[in-house]
Amino acid sequence: MATCRTARGNELTHAHVDPRTETRTAIYRMRGTMTVDLGRAQRTHWQSTHQAHPHMYGDEPSEPAQHAADVFSAGHATAVLHLGAGHGRDSLHFARRGFTVHATDFSRDGLTQLRTRAHQRGLAENITTTLHDARTPIPLPDGSVDGVFAHMLLCMALSTAEIRALVAEIRRVLRPGGTLVYTVRHTGDAHYGTGIAHGDDIYEHGGFAVHFFDRALVETLAQQWNPSEVHAFEEGRLPRRLWRITQTKPR
Ligand SMILES: C[S@@+](CC[C@H](N)C(=O)[O-])C[C@H]1O[C@@H](n2cnc3c(N)ncnc32)[C@H](O)[C@@H]1O
């Protein structure tokens, strides 16, 4: 594999490939001798962020989740998989809209906050949670969900190979005719190309690593799906510049 240097001079030394999933974990040799797995470091970072800032995204559902709920309803969906759910502002929305929700994240604290809110709101029966790293296979059978939602998950510290493997997994667990709605920060975002470069269009700011998507990557991920709709929007104070992508698994 080609050597890649980050802005800090760290060197991408090799990639570990999980033979079961063919997902790749980039191993970086930091300046000096320490070697760090960026994905593992991000897991620790997100875990402490959810701990330090409970309910950091508030209680209101995101705009993409409201769109997704409408799309899922129109497709007569009942079972929704919510990946990278965090503390679950959007899981609660899906449950309120009458879907059964399987929410996953690799932060134990995020999911604990989600379950607490679900109990407080009387929605606990409609929501199950699983601690899950999106770089590993989705722990669900083939064709077992009607809709999948992932807001700002695919643009986390996942390599392009890991993103492709994740979308293949999403396709596997979706029933034919089921819909995926996902959002990602893109190369028009103010943080693109700045901060600590980790290679593969991943840049880190304030400890948060983001994989900025270009249109070619979106188009690659839409292959073998029914035509995707790409909607540009902004969220937060920066603002983050995102695309919301809606694509359906062919029947
Ligand atoms: C930008 S936050 C968005 C949270 C939630 N989707 C929302 O909008 O409220 C990204 C979430 O993805 C989770 N995450 C990041 N990388 C992950 C991975 N490899 N596997 C599972 N979850 C991950 C983080 O813990 C965090 O909760």
Image (cartoon, grey):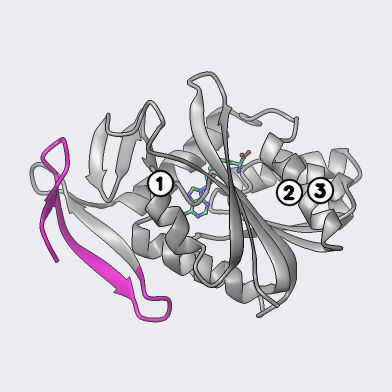
Q: Answer yes or no: do the residues labelled 3 and 2 have beta carbons within 8 Å?
A: yes
Above or below for 3 versus 51:
below
Report the residue marked by disc 1: 213
Question: Residue 135's quadrant in the figure?
Answer: bottom left
Dot 1 beta carbon under 8 Å from ligand 1: no
Residue 217 spot, x, y in % from top left:
40, 55
- Can you tell which mark lies on residue 233? none
Residue 79 in view (yes/no): yes
Q: Secondary structure at mark 1?
A: loop
Q: Earlier in the sequence, mark 1 or mark 2?
A: 2
- CA gap, disc 3 and disc 2: 5 Å
Residue 18 sits inside the magenta stretch:
yes
CB within 8 Å, label 1 to label 2: no
Q: Which residue is mark 2?
A: 68
Q: Amino acid at mark 1?
A: Phe
Q: Which residue is mark 3?
A: 70
**Is disc 2 surrounded by few (<14), some (14 to 19) or many (20+) residues within 10 Å?**
many
Element type where label 2 sits in the image = helix
Residue 144, quarter of the rendered image: bottom right
